[in-house]
Image (cartoon, rainbow, N blue to C red):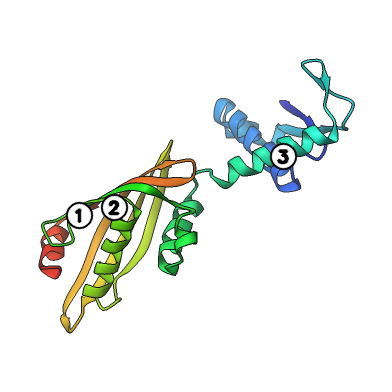
Amino acid sequence: MPVIRTTILEGFATAEQRSEITTRLADTLVDIFGDVTRPYIFSIVDEIKPGAWSIAGSVANEEMIAGGRQISQESLAKKLTVSRVGAAYDALATGDRAKIEEYWDADITWLVPGETSVSGTKTGLDDFLNFMKEVGGLSGNSFNMERTGVFISGDQSVDLSLNTATRAGDPSRALSIDVAHVLRWREGKIIEGRGAIFGTGTTEYNQFFA
């Protein structure tokens, strides 16, 4: 039977993280040997008390553990995940500049597809937010993005959405298009975004914002 044993300093990982260690390492072994081995895999996390472990000749104490844990938490807070992508869009919806700046870089560039007054490259956060404000105005704040999928690869994310709206002052002009956004991230913030519209959506988009 395969036995996976991981040794970490006591207090460094939360109970949830220890559970994730055992599960994900077991999953890795299953990927190698096949699902038939899963019932026989033992995955164990051992914790060593401070003072009982040395690193490069220095004894690991509680202060070192606290420092390492803080660095780990700061790194995890900026990790690109599906939930962080959603949080970035949710921050935009609040209109809170401080909240927005947690996810959207000051020097962001954003390429808007189509051939309309709102299309083209937006440079810098102010320009991007002005674009969002203009879209809100033209749609009477009816513009809505319903996310249907998010995919992560390295420092990039791709989110799919159904975008709907009605034109301000003319509810007969409606928008309903499938869109993909390709985002590039750095240090937990979006530094570049590109939009793409599927099928005949580009024509519909151009007509809506004409």
The residue where tag 3 is placed is 69
Observer-nearest of 101 and 143:
101
Mark pair 1, 3: CA separation: 44 Å
* Quadrant housing residue 51: top right
Label 2 close to label 1 by CB (< 8 Å): yes
Position of the N terminus, as image quadrant, is top right
| Label 1 close to label 3 by CB (< 8 Å) | no
Density class for disc 2 (Cα within 10 Å; few <14, some 14-19, many ≥20) is many
The total of numbered circles placed on residues is 3
The residue shown at (42%, 38%) is 155
Coordinates of residue 109 in the picture (x, y in percent): 29, 47
What's the distance in space between the residues labelled 2 and 1, CA to CA?
8 Å
- Give the left or right position of residue 24, taking residue 119 as reference: right
Please identify, in this view, whether the residue under mark 3 or under mark 2 is nearer the observer: 3
Question: What x and y, as percent, mark residue 176?
Answer: 22, 68
- Sequence-wise, the earlier of marks 2 and 1 is 2
- Quadrant where the image shows the C terminus: bottom left
Tell me which numbered mark, 1 or 3, is placed earlier along the sequence. Answer: 3
Q: Label 2 is placed on what type of residue?
A: Ala
Q: Which residue is mark 1?
A: 198
Amino acid type, mark 1: Phe
User: What amino acid is found at the position of numbered circle 3 in the picture?
Assistant: Arg
The residue labelled by disc 2 is 180
Identify the residue shown where x is 66% and y is 38%: 71
Mark closer to the chain start, 3 or 2 = 3
- Quadrant housing residue 2: top right
In the image, is residue 181 above or below residue 64?
below
Dot 1 falls on a residue whose secondary structure is loop
Q: Residue at the spot x=50%, y=54% of the render? A: 83
Q: Residue furthest top?
A: 57
Q: Is residue 200 above or below residue 185?
A: below
How would you rate the neighbour count of disc 1 (Cα within 10 Å): few for under 14, some for 14-19, many for 20 or more? few
